[in-house]
Image: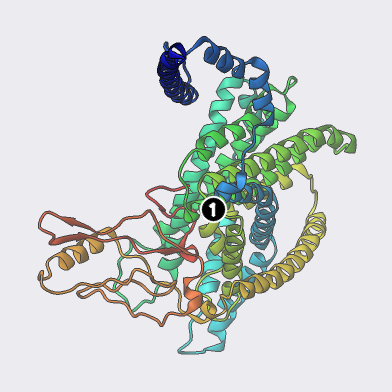
Amino acid sequence: MADSVAAGPGDEKETENEDKDREKGASNNTTRAEMSSGASEVTETLGFYERNASKKDKKRNLSDLSLVRFIRAELTRGYFLEHNEAKYTERRERVYTCLRIPKELEKLMIFGFFLCLDAFLYVFTLLPLRVLLALIRLLTLPCCRLSGTRILQPAQVCDVLKGFILVLCYSMMHYVDYSMMYHMIRGQSVIKLYIIYNMLEVADRLFSSFGQDILDALYWTATEPKERKRAHIGVIPHFLMAVLYVFLHAILIMVQATTLNVAFNSHNKSLLTIMMSNNFVEIKGSVFKKFEKNNLFQMSNSDIKERFTNYVLLLIVCLRNMEQFSWNPDHFWVLFPDVCMVIASEVAVDVVKHAFITKFNDITADVYSEYRASLAFDLVSSRQKNAYTDYSDTVSRRMGFIPLPLALLLIRVVTSSVKIQGSLSLVSWGCLLLSPLFICLVLNSIVLLGKSCLYVKEANMEEKLFQKPPSAAPSRTSSRTNRVKYNSSPPGDPVEEDIATSVTSQPIHNGDHSTSVLPNSESDQFLTTPDETEEKDLSQDGMELTHRAPKKDLLEIDRFTICGNRID
């Protein structure tokens, strides 16, 4: 009894000690579990295992990084493009723009080609008739004794001058031996001919730029009102300069055609291949540059002019080769693959060049419809009664295409290739050649005029047809003078500048040089693009302002206008 009583308290103490040990074990297990979970979290987050982690945790985590698990993760990994919807939508629109470029560009090229064709055929068909009518008026008007009237209208004076220039230059071209030039060029090496051809292309652009200024100066000098003070050297010196220019430009184009003819007649076609590769070099020089809408308009006009000129050069090459083979039609099919290859390379280079220029500069394909509307506006405005220039001169300024030297060379090649004997045969051949050209000119002009009216109407440019032509841009001297006057104004006076100018309105300058400003309309803002962004900057004390250049409308941009500090 005493033993049992004595054993009772001892057992109770043992049970209490066991309970305490169990509680301690449980607490230790919870802390270990927390530590292991924390270690696993650190392991999953940082990607490595702590040294204090248990071997079981290491084995379990290493099994998670197996090769199969990695491959499965790569195969089943997903992403959502809709989280960056704006970026991918923009990329898709760029692709669609590149796909639209060939169609829109070729529409512009075809329209521009027929514009150049119209101006080119005008020299062969309508210009001789207009010169004949002017000469008849010049001979008959003094007999009528009409006082107070001008003997010739300004347009007739310009036509007579063009006719005299063509006649004099054609007589001078007879002293140039085409055969001697051909054999002289044929004796040169391939690399030398390649360099010569590139130099001729550069010289052609320079001649076109300065030559149109020479012709415009001649026309204005001959038709300037007599009551004004004389500020020129005279009509005869200007006429002699124009004759010299047309003759030299025609010689330059003849050398180009002769070089191309040598390339066609070479046995290994190496020169032709090198000349075609020169077109692809043009991509490198144009694509990776910053372009604005005005610069792209200039490049498009240049491409139109270049393509038309190449077609005429290919025609001259075919005529010269057919003459050497006694007009055998079988020889034409020998030349036909090379002709198609040159044309295809030209088209491909233009498409690739314009596609990437529009892509890199974020220009939409709709801009080519604006360019086409601008060219159509030139055609429609030149057909009005109050037109201030001839259409062929407008094309020359806009595209840099001057038809007189090219027409002169073609006349020289045709007359030397086709042997004509007798005056009767000359008249019959003339009628036979000019009749289809006249018919083509009439049909081409009618279709072009209808299309141009449609393009102008679609562009909402009808109001501009009844506005006065834009006045000449101020010279650098006057602009500097106006800038000095502007900067010399008191600092307290507010100065405002209307940045958005229309096609016909000019910036208002303080001082004596002021121009009238016509009311603006919504259509005046069409085709208006700024030059390079030149914001107003305050210098030193904030007294002097550097103004942003006024916006230039596409109707004011010609082939050799400086846009964005460069000409394209």
- Coloring applied to the structure: rainbow
Q: Considering depth in this image, is 69 or 232 the residue closer to the camera?
A: 69
Of 429 and 500, the residue lying toward us: 500
Q: Identify the secondary structure beneath mark 1.
A: loop
Q: Between residue 357 and residue 417, name the one nearer to us.
A: 357
The count of marks equals 1
Residue 416 location (% of width, % of height): 72, 43
Q: Quadrant of residue 479?
A: bottom left
**In this rendering, would 535 be left or right of 471?**
left
Label 1, residues with CA under 10 Å away: few <14, some 14-19, many ≥20: some
Q: Residue 394 location, x and y as percent? A: 54, 64
Amino acid carrying mark 1 in the image: Ile
Which residue, given by chain and number where applicable, does mark 1 sit on?
Answer: 363
The answer to whether residue 211 is above or below residue 329 is below
**Looking at the image, can residue 311 be seen?**
yes
Is residue 51 shown above or below 512? Answer: above
Q: How far across and how far down the image is residue 171, in percent?
A: 60, 49
- Horizontal side of 522 relative to 459 (left or right) equals left
Out of 380 and 295, give the one closest to the viewer. Answer: 295
Work out which residue is located at the far front of the displayed protein and give it.
1
Residue 189 seen in the figure: no
Image quarter of residue 257 = top right
Residue 512 quadrant = bottom left
In the shown orientation, is residue 424 left or right of residue 233? right
Residue 23 image offset from top left, x and y in percent: 43, 23
Residue for point 57% across, 47% down = 83
